Image: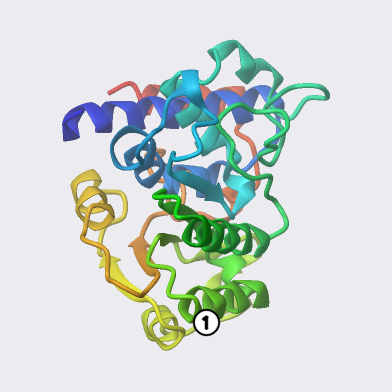
Amino acid sequence: MNVQELQDVARQVRRDIIIMTNKAGAGHPGGSLSATEALVALYFDVMKGIDPKDDKNPNRDRFVLSKGHSAPGLYGVLCERGYFGREEFDHFRQLHGILQGHPDTKKCPGVDASTGSLGQGISIAVGMALGAKHTGNPCHVYTMIGDGESDEGMVWEASMAAAHYKLDNLTVILDHNGMQIDGTNDQVMSLGDYRAKFEAFGYDIIEVKDGNDMQQVLDALHAPDCPGKPRLVLLQTLKGKGVSFMEGQVGWHGKAPNAEQAAQALKELEG
């Protein structure tokens, strides 16, 4: 796909996020919308061996959504990629549905790890990358973490291990929209200089000034690996990206749009 085609997919995924959360009356649209370009880039351009008809290929690249509450964004991408039909959106966050509030690998095709408890996803991804190193598996492991999640000590314990074991087959993507459930990062728990922190923990860093610009995201994710180091792709993103009344508003972290708001959002996302 070219960049325009990827942008078109991203627009549809944003519509899917609105549709899902509105139908359920619950969910996390803000951080799903900020992460959309990265998720689309991974599944439609970057990751190797991704095939809905062979989703257990042992050599496929892996993705772990460590900030599991942004599941609507992942589900939108998996649907557009062909893992399941759009009818599943009607059962988002419903009992017995495959699209639970957080990704469930036992229920949803294409999900490589069940996540939700913040900090655990990156820890799982480190284990996957370490296992691949030990067995000679050529796969690359990608994981996405969030701002609020980075308050968790597990993120930094996992990062120490990633550097110690020289996991250059691991890419951590930070969706840095500057907000978490209770307010801005600085209001809740300032982490200061993200870049300096991750460098101190042994990462190779690529910083993306606009993490909602598809070309910038692609350039970062396709950059050559740094031998012996895990990588952090630090995406500067906008919470609620693509929906005017959600952009930069912390209140849309975990609140679903009502019918009127959903209609407005979908109209803005018509393209």
- Total number of numbered labels? 1
For the point 37% across and 67% down, the residue is 168
For the point 62% across and 58% down, the residue is 124
The quadrant of the rendering that contains the C terminus is: top left
Rendering quarter of residue 105: top right
The quadrant of the rendering that contains the N terminus is: top left
Q: Nearer the viewer, residue 50 or 183?
A: 50
Secondary structure, mark 1, is loop
Q: Nearer the viewer, residue 232 or 152?
A: 232
Q: Is residue 148 above or below residue 85?
A: below
The three-letter amino acid code for the residue at tag 1 is Leu
Applied colour scheme: rainbow
Name the residue beneath numbered marker 1. Answer: 191
Graded by Cα atoms within 10 Å as few (under 14), some (14 to 19) or many (20 or more), the crowding at tag 1 reads few
Q: Is residue 262 above or below residue 223?
A: above
Q: Horizontal and vertical percent for residue 166?
A: 43, 75
Q: Horizontal and vertical percent for residue 246?
A: 48, 45
- Say whether residue 85 is left or right of residue 49: right
